[in-house]
Image (cartoon, coloured by chain):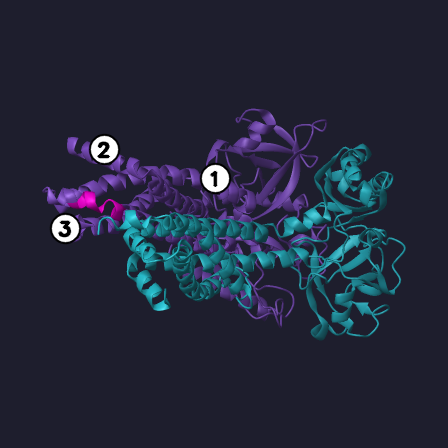
Chain colours: A cyan, B purple
Amino acid sequence: MSFYMLCKVLFSRKVVTGLLLLQLAMTLALLLNSILLAQQTHQQLSQPTGLDLDNILLVQLKPTTASLRVYPALEDLLNRQLDAVQAIPGVIAAAYSNQSPIAQGGNNGNIFVVEQQERTNVPSVPMYFVSKDFFKVLGSQVLQGELPQHSVSLDAPGTPDVVLTQSLAQKLFGSASAPGQQVSRGRVAAVISDFYGQRSGSHVMYNNMQVAPPYGVDWGYSILLRSQPQHTAAVRQQLDSALRNVEPNIEIYNIRTLAEQHQRLYRNEYGLATLLALLSGLMLLVTMVSSYSSTHFHALKRQQEIGIKRALGASKKIIFIELLTENWLCTALGSVLGVFLALLLNHALAQVISIPALSGYLPLVAITVLLLCVTVATWYPATIATRVSPATATKAL
Amino acid sequence: MEQFIYYLKVSFKGIKRAPLPYALTIFILSVGLGVFFANATFYYQLNRDPLPQKSDKLFFPMLNLVPYECSTDCKTPSVLSYNNVEKLSQTDIPTQAAAMYSADGYLRQSADQAPLPVSIRITQRDFFSLFDVPVLHGSIWPDNSARHEVILTKSSAEKLFGRTNVIGEKLLLDDRNVTVAAVLDTWQMLPRLYDANNRNHLSDADDIYLPLETGYDMNYLSNSQSQTFDDTDYRQLSTQGRTGALHQLQYWVQLDTPAQQQRYWQFMANLVQDEKAAGRHPSAPNNQLVAMRNIVSYFGGESSDIKAFALVTLLFLLVCLFNASHLSLNRYLSNQYEFSLRRALGANRSQLQLQMLADVLLMAIFTIIGALITGFAGIKLMNQLLPANSLFSNWDLPLLLSLLAIAFVCSYLVTLYPSLRASFGTLNQQLKE
C-alpha cells in the first residue's frame, strides 16, 4: 500500500488517530525525560569518591550522659572505643572523626590563604577533627608533605597542622607547593588524594583535616574503620557489642558501609528516577493497550476490505505488514510530536529539579523502544486479521 | 427509580457483552487516577496552610547584623544570634514573639534507667500561643526567664510515665534535674512552618520543650543550623554564646495589622541603622520580614521531587484519559447498532443520555475503587522511595472528596464524547452498518 493510502486510512478515523498520536507523543516525552533522570542518577552514584566504599565501615554514635561528652572523659572514651574496635579480627585500621565523609552537610567553614583572603577565600569547606589513622582508614595517598603523627588539642596554644585534599590545595595554591604555607586554619602539613566530603560544600572533593580530638560531640561523632574485604560482614556484626562493652552509656545511631552511606545521600534522586521509570513503564503498557485495541477494533471494522484484498490475491503476509505499517506510521508521527513535547517537559522539569538537557542519541533509543512496544502490541490483532477468509468476508456483498 | 434500575441493568448487560474492553478502560483510568491521587496527596499536604486563621499575621524577621563586611555573598543569615534576638525583642509592636531552636538530648526518670533520646524545642513562652498549641495538663511558663521546667508532649509523657497527668514529676534531662510544668495535648503542625530552615518543616513535632534561657545555660547547641561569624567558642554557649556572633535562633513575631507590620519593618530598619552608626555591623542592611506562608519558598525548601512528579503524573493522567476515551469510543462504536435500534424504536436522545449517565455512574464506582487501591499502593511506594515526605501521606475528608469528584468528572469525560457520537449519528447509515 502506498504512503498516501496509509495516511488516508489513518486519518479516515481522525479522533481515534488523534488520541493515539497524543498518547504516543506524551509517552515518548515521559520516557525520554525518565531516561535522562535515570542516567543522571546513575552518573551521580558512579562518580568517583576516592574511597573504598565497600570495605570502610562507619559508626555514628553519641554518649548519652553529659559527663562523657566533656574532656578528659571524652578523650578517654574515644581511645577506649578505638582500642576495642581495632581488636576485632579483620580490622585493618580505625579512627574517630567529628563527622563522616560522604554527607549532605555538617561542620564546615571558610578557608583562605593568610593575608590573601579576598583572592583565595573558599566557603563551606568541611572541617574534620580526626585521630591519626583516619588517613589509613580512608586509604589516602600522601601527595605532598608529611602527615601529622600526634594528636594536638584544639585548646592547646597554637593550632594543629592542617591536611588538605588535592583539589582544595590546588584551589588555594595553584601549582605551588602547599606544605609549610599558612592557611586560616593553621599551617599546611600535607596534601592527600581527594575523597568525597560534603555534598552541600563548595566542591565535594574540598576537605580539610586536623589531627585533634573534636571540640565537642554534641552532634555525635563517627568511628570509621577499614576491614579486610572477607571480614567486613563479620566485623559489622561485632561492632555494636564491642562498643557497648566499652561503654554502655552510648547511643549508636547507625552502622553502615560507606557504600550504603553514598546510596542514602542520593536516595531522593534514586527515588524520583525509580518513580519516573515505573511511570514510564506504565505509560508504555497503557500505550500498548491502546495500540492493541485500536488495531483489533479496526481490523474487525475492516473485515470486508481485508476479505476483498485477500480474494484479489493479497497474501496473509501483505495484510499483516500493512496493518503493522499503519501502526508504525502512527508511532513515527507521534514520535515527531513526542520529541517536541519532550523538550517542553524537559524545560518544565528543569524549573523544579536538576535534569540534563535533551540531546544526542536518546530520542532514537526511546523511539526504538516505543516502536518495539507498539509492534508487540499490534502483532496479535494483526495476525488475527490475516485469518479472515475471503469467502466469509465478501459474502455480504 | 425503576427506570434508573433498568438503565443500570442495560449497562451491566453491555459490560457482560464485551468485558475485556470495559475492564481495560477501568484499569487504565484507575491507574491514571491512582497515580495522580498518590502524588496529589503529598502535594496537597505539603502545600497546605497549617494555621489558616493567622498564617498571614506571623512573620520571621532576619537582620544582616554580622561582624564583617560582606563583599560577595551578602545574603542575610537565616538564623539570628542571641544578641540579635535581644535587640529585636526591645519593642512592644508585635502582639506576641518567640525565639527558638532545637537540640537533641536524653531524658530519663532516674540515673539507673535507660535514656530516652528526645528532640528538644528550646523556646519562649509565646511559642504556644503563637502556634495555637493545646495544653492538656498544667500551665505554660509564666515568663521567659530561666527555669528547670520542661513541657512534655502527650506521647512523651505516656512513654516515660505511662500516663499524661505528670505535672510536678521530676526528670533527668542530660543528667540535670528538671520538673514537668505542663503536658501538651495531641498536636502536630504539618508542615512545621515554624522551623523551615534546612527542610525541617518536613519533620515531626519535638518531644519536649525547654525555656530558651535554660537551654543556653545548659549549653544546648542547635541540631539544625548554627553559624559562627567570630571567635565565639560554641562550647561556651551560656557565656560567649549570649554575646558573640553565634547564630542559631529562629524568631517569630505576630503582627496583626498592616500598620503593625509597617511599624515593625521601620523598627528593624532603625535598629540596623543604629548598629551601623555605632560601627558594630559594617555589612549593608538587608532586612527580611518573611510571612509564614512564604517561609518554605524563601528558604528554598519546597519539595522539588514532588513538584516534578506532579507535573509528570498530570501528564500520565492525561494519557490515561485519552486512552480510556479511545477504548470507550471503540466500545460505543461497536454498540452503535443497538443505540440506533433504540432510537429507531422511539427512544429520544435525552433517554439515551440518561442511559449514558448510568454507564458513567457504574464506571465511576469501579474507577474510584480501583483508583483508591492504586493510590494507596502508590503512597506506600512513594513513602519507600521518598521517605522524607512520609508524614504527608494521609488522606483527609476534603482531599478525599476532591479526589472522588475528580474521578467522577474523569469517568464522565471518558464516556461523554463516545456516547454523543453513538447517539447523534445519522440513523439510516448506522442501521445499515
CA separation, marks 3 and 2? 24 Å
Residue at 68% across, 57% down: A46
Circles 3 and 2: CB distance less than 8 Å?
Answer: no
Identify the magenta region.
Answer: B332-340
Depicted A35 relative to depicted B406: above or below:
below
Q: Secondary structure at mark 2?
A: helix
**Are discs 3 and 2 located on one and the same chain?**
yes
Q: The residue marked by circle 2 belongs to what chain?
A: B
Between circles 1 and 2, the one closer to the viewer is: 2
Name the residue beneath numbered marker 2.
Answer: B9
Which residue sits furthest top? B162
Magenta span contains residue B334: yes
Give me the disc on residue B427.
3
- Residue B367 percent coordinates (x, y): 35, 40
Position of residue B426 in the picture relative to residue A302 (left or right): left
Circles 1 and 3: CB distance less than 8 Å?
Answer: no
- Residue B9 percent coordinates (x, y): 23, 33
Is residue B196 visible to the viewer in this orientation of the structure? yes
For label 3, the crowd category at 10 Å Cα-Cα, with few meaning under 14, some 14 to 19 and many 20 or more, is some
Name the image quarter holding the N terminus of chain A: bottom left
Q: Secondary structure at mark 3?
A: helix
Q: The residue marked by circle 3 belongs to what chain?
A: B
Name the residue beneath numbered marker 1.
Answer: B377
Magenta span contains residue B77: no
Residue type for callout 1: Ala
Position of residue B283 in the picture relative to residue A2 (left or right): right
Mark with earlier residue (1, 2): 2
Residue type for callout 3: Leu
CA separation, marks 1 and 2? 32 Å
